[in-house]
Amino acid sequence: MAASDLVASAIQWIGSLLVQEATILFEVADQVRGLQEDLELMQQYLQDADAKQDMKEIRTLVRQIRKLAYDAEDVIDTYILEVEGKADVLGKKGWFMKFACFLHTAPQTYSIGKQIQLMQSNVKRITDSLVDSGVRRITKVGEDLRSSSNRERCSKQKSRSYPYDDDGEFIVGLEKDINILVQVLMGEGETQVKFVSIVGMGGSGKTTLARKLYNHPYTKECFDCCVWVCISQEWSTRHVLSEILRKVSSPMEISKLNATSSMDELVDKLRSILEKKSYFVVLDDVWRKEALEEILPALPHISDNKGSKIIITTRNQEVVQFQNLQRHLYVHEPRPLNKDESWELFCKIACNYHTNCNNASYENLGKEMLKKCDGLPLAIVALAGILNTKRSIGEWQQVSEVVRSKVMEGKCTHMYGKVGDMLALSYDDLPCDLKPCFLHLGVFPEDCQIPAGMLTRMWIAEGLVTAIDEMTLEDVAMQRLEELSHRFMIQIVRTNFKGAIKAIHMHDLLRELCVRKAKEQNFLQVNAHITNFASNGASAMAFQSRRAALHSSTCFPTQASNLRSLVLLTRSTVMHSAYVSKETLDLGVLHQNFKLLRLLNLWGIKTTTGALPTQIGSLVHLRYLGIRASNITELPMSIGNLRNLLTLDYRNIDSDDDVKVPNVLYKLTQLRHLFLPMKCPWILKELQLSALKNLQILWGVKCVGGDWFSREMPKLSMTLKKLKVFVSTEKDLDAIFSCPSLKFDRLHTFHCEWESSIALCVNRVFSHNQHLNKLVLVGKIRLQNPTLMLPSNLLVLELIDSVLENVDLILVAGALAHLKLLRLSNSYTGTAFTCNPGSFPQLEELYLDNLQNLSTWRIEEGAMSILKKLEILSCRKLQFPQGLAFVTTLQQLEFFGVPPEFSKQAKVYGWSQERIRLPHNFEAIVEQFDPPFDISSIHKLYERLTTGIFLDNTKKKFWILKEEDNQYNCFMVYATDLSLAAEHDIDGLPVWNTGHEIDETTSYLYSSTSKLQWKWTEIEERDGPLIKVANLKAEVLVIDVRGRFDTNNLSPHVTYTFSFVFMLDVSEWVGMIHVKTQLRLADGSSLQQSRTLNGKPRNEWLKVSTVEFETHPKNIGEAEFSLCCQWGDYTYVAFVVKGVVIEPKLQSSN
């Protein structure tokens, strides 16, 4: 920040302390207020001083001012900390103890008085020096071109999409490049392109072009999976491969990676998945050739794959100049925009309702400035973003002067040329109170999506925003974020249906500018090196800045006693990557080294104890505590001492243990945002929250037993804006829906879940709340008068497991004038409903899921007039909607689990589902899926089908294998679904090799006819949960494994093999192992095969195939299979049975 910005921040902080800490600062309030006034006087000179820093003496004074502002905060914060600590020791009750406390803190009072006097003297000295150096005193707000009037205009201006948004609203001049590259990707033959490298300087549009290819219809139609991963300057091969794996595999597989997987295992998993697919991978922002040399060999050999493509964006041509790429490489360099294209892009951003770019004066100035952008899109966007905030021709002229003087004459020459110059001007043009918000963005890792809610809550905790008029802190923070978007300093990634920002992204050049400026001004220091420092707090890191962000290390800085903000956010945690560091943290150093902390965000950390240390309560300045997705299951009683805490984010705890929340949260009277671990089995019987009168968000309240809801809900804060609860009794449900907060206009998001054994019976409660925008109800609903139930201003309505017997509530939803999204999941048991003309007038997205009885859906002309997306899942009786052709705005139709006639009719209307073709007999297989199974998206389902889905309580696994244009059903039958036998004597086993018969009396579930005992152990399946394998350690002569399988579930007219998977460790070979396999099909035919295993490796899984057979209508049904291993003499063996693989014979068997 500039000196003026920093002093303004110090003045604001001191002012807030005089109010919030009035009791503690009572003895020194006059001195503190005097220091504040002196700083305000000095601030009037600093705007001109910041503009004259080319003078050496002024630069020296500015450095002194920056230190002085920091010292002022340190002195006051330290005094509060020391006085608070002694007051806690002595207690505060009774006049005698108060007098004792006064005497005990007298030394600190005397010391701060002397320090303030010294600082006031320094302020006067520096102010006099500024006057002597010719610095002007500026007292009028109007002299600051970045005035509040601009701020008000920005706040009223409609939010725009960033120029590089997927919708392409501001994409200019790329159509030809896109067409060329699509044709290149579609090429075939020996010269078929496998790699496309997009090379150009920063800001030339490389990523934009790659994003357009990634979202192109050709890409979505022709590839099984598409993956986008950012490499950046600080890259880790393991992280990159984990990111790719996360996007192409199942969540269960991801969850098993952290603890045990080596790099080789990671590569093997990734290859095993991708070699079955045609994939499209974008490696964005590659800086060094070494990155590709390590990453590409980990992927399946692309020349042997099924048309897979890899897109590489880089600023350095040398990155792709190595032998393995040259044969199938196409290099594309985005061309600069020509004059007309540059002007078109410029006008789309710079021109607003106050400026008319067709006016000759504006046009001449704009085109003159555009000459300095050299046709580079990001430079044009940066310049236009500055002018977007200017009202008059006079302000345009002033910007033109700055551009002419700094860019033309080279005074602002940047390492990235004209783009860097323009971005630097964008930062300089920011209002003084917006600059720290921009610099704070550097705490987030490069190339990650930044959650807007968490960001704005961190701004509030840091004191970077203050309330304005009637606006809340949250509203002001969101307004600041919108201002950054209007200036195109950030990219809006996602908004809600109200247009509010939900997630943002920063261009890498803007982030580099952010981090560099923050470090120069000691605002923030970022440690982003991939190589970890010493763990568990032992680190030599020293931070001069007031804020520290650690993006890869799991150690804390030790030389940072004045640190105000400590953030540990890796790209893995923010992006939910597959890889998270295995190291754990010792939080005991926090209270020793960081006593003045205001913000502590440790998202996803793993602590050594699983608990916060008791000493956390000594951080009395703490305003934000983030331990989201950590393994912390216990909060100490001392957390009640954090009386300044504004945000406690305790969501998504990564532990199976019970969570313990002490009954001290009622002491946190300043708390505004409380996120609790709803999924954990904790009990709230004694927890008091009704005293939290400033609470804006209460998310994740779950109570099992007790009277918490009836006791606390009626007294909850009337300021609540977001509420999420889970209840288990009808009494609690009544208490929830009688909550006064539901009847007040502040609440805009309400999410309620309840047990399946109870039902909601409510009529009028929501009709009072016209500000409720999002309503999620999970549980049975009984209606009496639905016309009075739903708020008229709802934007999002989700009814899940409602089991409604009539369509009345859906019809009521259809009459809502503003509804944008409707989700009906197991919510209607009827057979038909009709959307009448004019119903759902603003609906854009509709999701129908698991409506098992619904067969007829009629859409009258004029209904759903702007519907864009329709997704239908598991509606097994539903015919193709009558009248869907009337919905001409529909852009996306996805479906699965519907009758074949539905699919046929969809094709008639042009909705082909070719790429998402469901497997043979899918309806029967899907009923065996193990919960929880995410079928919220058809594309997610299809990706899961290719990696594998577990069935029947992990006794089986199902996946599809793609080969060219065909797909085949494959299965694994695990040992828990087999019959196992082992004997000293072959006569003790069922006789099967004589008459080729299998004993019909054998049980196939956890049983055995053997006299020897098998033991069950668990192992990690590479793409799923723990599975059980059967172990036997004994002297044996023969081992027998048998099972059954319904071949109806196999793809028809395909040659299959049954392969047994086992492991053996023979202590001493005695002859050879004779293996006999047998398969009896449903039509009575029997096939067998004998083979000898000699010299097979031990301690590795062996895959022994049986005879082949072709699925045919005559032989499908229940098949019986067996394997017999026989030794020539008694042998001590360790034999482990994993199961049987049933797969098509497309390659040679092992």
Image (spheres, rainbow, N blue to C red):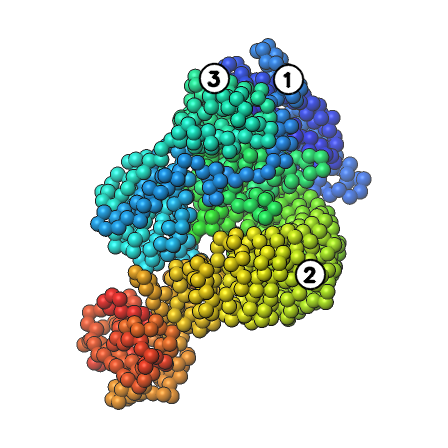
Residue type for callout 1: Ile
State the CA–CA distance, disc 3 to disc 2. Answer: 68 Å
From the image, which quarter does the C terminus lie in?
Answer: bottom left
Residue depicted at x 45% and y 71%:
923
Q: Residues at badges 3 and 2 in contact (C-beta under 8 Å)?
A: no
Quarter of the image for residue 676 reads bottom right
Q: Nearer the viewer's eye, disc 1 or disc 2?
A: 1
Tell me if 520 is positioned left or right of 1071 in this view: right
Q: Nearer the viewer, residue 557 or 465?
A: 465
> Looking at the image, can residue 357 be seen?
yes
Kindly identify which residue carries mark 3: 405
Kindly identify which residue carries mark 1: 138
Residue type for callout 3: Ser
Q: In this view, does 1120 lie above or below 478?
A: below
Which element is circle 3 on?
Answer: helix
Q: Where is residue 305 in the image (x, y as percent from the top left)?
A: 28, 55
> Looking at the image, can residue 1060 be seen?
no
Mark 1: few, some, or many residues within 10 Å (few <14, many ≥20)? some
Q: Which of 456 and 543 is in front in this view?
A: 456
Q: Nearer the viewer's eye, disc 3 or disc 2?
A: 3
* Badge 1 or badge 2: first in the primary sequence: 1
State the CA–CA distance, disc 1 to disc 2. Answer: 59 Å
Quarter of the image for residue 330 reads top left
* Badge 1 or badge 3: first in the primary sequence: 1
Residue 685, disc:
2
Residue type for callout 2: Lys
Tell me if 918 is positioned left or right of 716 in this view: left
State the CA–CA distance, disc 1 to disc 3. Answer: 23 Å
Q: Where is residue 1110 in the image (x, y as percent from the top left)?
A: 28, 75
Residue depicted at x 33% and y 55%:
278
